[in-house]
Amino acid sequence: GSTGATGAVGATGAAGATGAQGPTGPEFARRVGTITQSATPAINTDNMDIASITGLAQAITGFTMSGTPVAGQMLIIQITDNATGRAITWGTSFESSTITLPSTTVASAMLTTGFQWDVATSKWRCMGVA
């Protein structure tokens, strides 16, 4: 039946532990995108949940964003420079909250910044920096 081991909500069913909507299924898997380092990194939020930039060799003057985010969608941007701290200008697609957007990388350390899509402002709202 629908609640049996292989039913819709059973252990291996669509909403079960290993099903498509379960905690180990693809709906919980984060899509990681490797972004080419540049002054204007391009991120398509329809294709990735985590954007990873490594070897950043110049300041970021703004991100080129594409995709159609939905209410509450999360985005993580990870930036590692090339052993020299780099300035970051986030651009108009991003906003601070009670947490301020970081303005520089720290030499050789990964900067991880988390965002949530804010439907009211149509911006990626900073939720955390590490």
Image: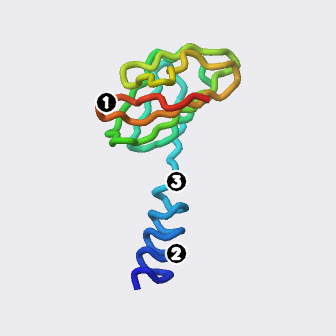
| Neighbour tally class for label 2: few under 14, some 14-19, many 20 plus, Cα within 10 Å | some
Q: Quadrant of residue 58?
A: top right
Marked residue nearer the N-terminal end (3 or 2):
2
At label 3, which amino acid type do we have? Ala
Tag 1 residue: 122
Residue 44 x, y percent position in the rendering: 40, 37
Above or below, 39 relative to 42: above
Residue type, numbered disc 2:
Ala
Q: CA distance from mark 3 to mark 1?
A: 25 Å
Report the disc number at residue 39.
none
Question: Which label is found at residue 11?
Answer: 2
- Position of 67 with respect to 49 (left or right) is left
Q: In which quadrant of the rendered image does the N terminus lie? A: bottom left
Residue occupying the point 32% across, 39% down: 68
Name the kind of residue labelled 1 in the image. Ser
* Residue occupying the far front of the picture: 98
Q: Secondary structure at mark 2?
A: loop
Q: Separation of disc 1 and disc 2 at Cα?
A: 38 Å
Mark 3: few/some/many CA within 10 Å (<14, 14-19, 20+): few
Residue under label 3, please give it.
29
On screen, residue 10 above or below 57: below
Count the labels in the image.
3
Q: CA distance from mark 3 to mark 2?
A: 18 Å
Q: State the image quarter where residue 47 is shown.
A: top left
Which tag is nearer the camera, tag 3 or tag 2?
2
Task: Write the residue at 50% across / 55% down.
Answer: 28
Where's residue 30, x and y in %? 51, 49
Q: For numbered disc 3, what is the local secondary structure? A: loop
Nearer the observer: mark 3 or 1; the answer is 1
Image quarter of the C terminus? top right
Q: Is residue 4 above or below residue 37?
A: below
* Residue 69, above or below 130: below
